Structures are given as C-alpha cells and as structure tokens.
Amino acid sequence: MTLIVSIICLAIIAFIWWWFFGHHEEDGKRAQRRSGYQEIEVEVMGGYSPSRIILKKDVPARIVFHRKDPSSCLDQIVFPDFGVHADLPLNDRYVVEITPKESGTYGFACGMNMMHGQLIVE
C-alpha cells in the first residue's frame, strides 16, 4: 500500500514539474501564399494563437491580428525589429505588413511586454 501511494505521489510531482517547468512550445504555423503575399491570422485572446509564426524571407507578409480580448495589456502589438508599434482594435482585425529580409527568430509582444510571440523567418 505504501508503495502505491509513493508511486502516485511521484507521478503527481512529475506532472507538476512538467506543467510548470516543461517547454510547451507549439511547432508554429506557416503563413499561406496569397496574391504575392504570405498571410496568416493571429487570434489575440489571453495571448497569441498561434504564438509562433513561420515566414519566408524576402516575401511581403501580412499578419492579421484579430483581437478578442478586452484586456488593456493586449491592446497593442510591438515588433521591435521591424519598427512596428500599433494599436489593436477590439473585436476587429488589424493588418501588420512587413517584408522580412533576414532569416532568424524575432520576437513580438504586447505593449506592456507581458505576452510574447515569435516570428521565425526561413
């Protein structure tokens, strides 16, 4: 009986450790080609979904943010490497247009720098 309780306790501890300290990264979502652009829609609700966006370099991109969260933290989007700092209207779409010139990983965040996402350029 003691062995079973010990195994259950260890399993719970392992789960808690995985939940709080494990890397729960999504693979990312690729933008789709449309009329000379690559385009992707990002839902803004308690964060960004998808939070990892994959783009091709040297192809103009349209990242369409659809803000559904009324939180003031998520009312702005900032792409510091691309000089973008914009207000996101609530319950509407806002298009960020960029043309990534260099491969790499770039961050984006809310105006308070609390919610983050990644832009992966291949």
Image (cartoon, rainbow, N blue to C red):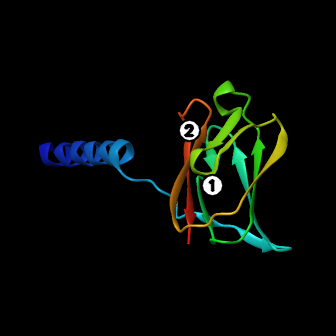
Instruction: Name the residue that disc number 2 marks.
Output: 115
Question: Can you tell which quarter of the image residue 115 is in?
Answer: top right
Question: Can you tell which quarter of the image residue 36 is in?
Answer: bottom right
Instruction: Name the residue that disc number 1 marks.
Output: 50
Q: Amino acid at mark 2?
A: Met
Residue 62 position in % (x across, y down): 76, 59
Task: Label 2, secondary structure: give it.
Answer: loop
Residue 5 position in % (x across, y down): 20, 43
User: Camera-side residue: 18 or 56?
Assistant: 56
Q: Is residue 93 above or below residue 97?
A: above
**Mark 2 vs mark 1: which is more N-terminal?**
1
Residue at the spot 72% in from the left edge and 48% down from the top edge: 43
Residue at the spot 13% in from the left edge and 48% down from the top edge: 3
How busy is the neighbourhood of tag 1: few (under 14 within 10 Å), some, or many (20 plus)? some
User: Camera-side residue: 52 or 104?
Assistant: 104
Q: Amino acid at mark 1?
A: Pro
Numbered badge on residue 107: none
Q: Is residue 93 left or right of residue 82?
A: right
Location of the N terminus by quadrant is top left
Task: Label 1, secondary structure: give it.
Answer: loop
Q: Residue furthest left?
A: 2
Location of the C terminus by quadrant is bottom right
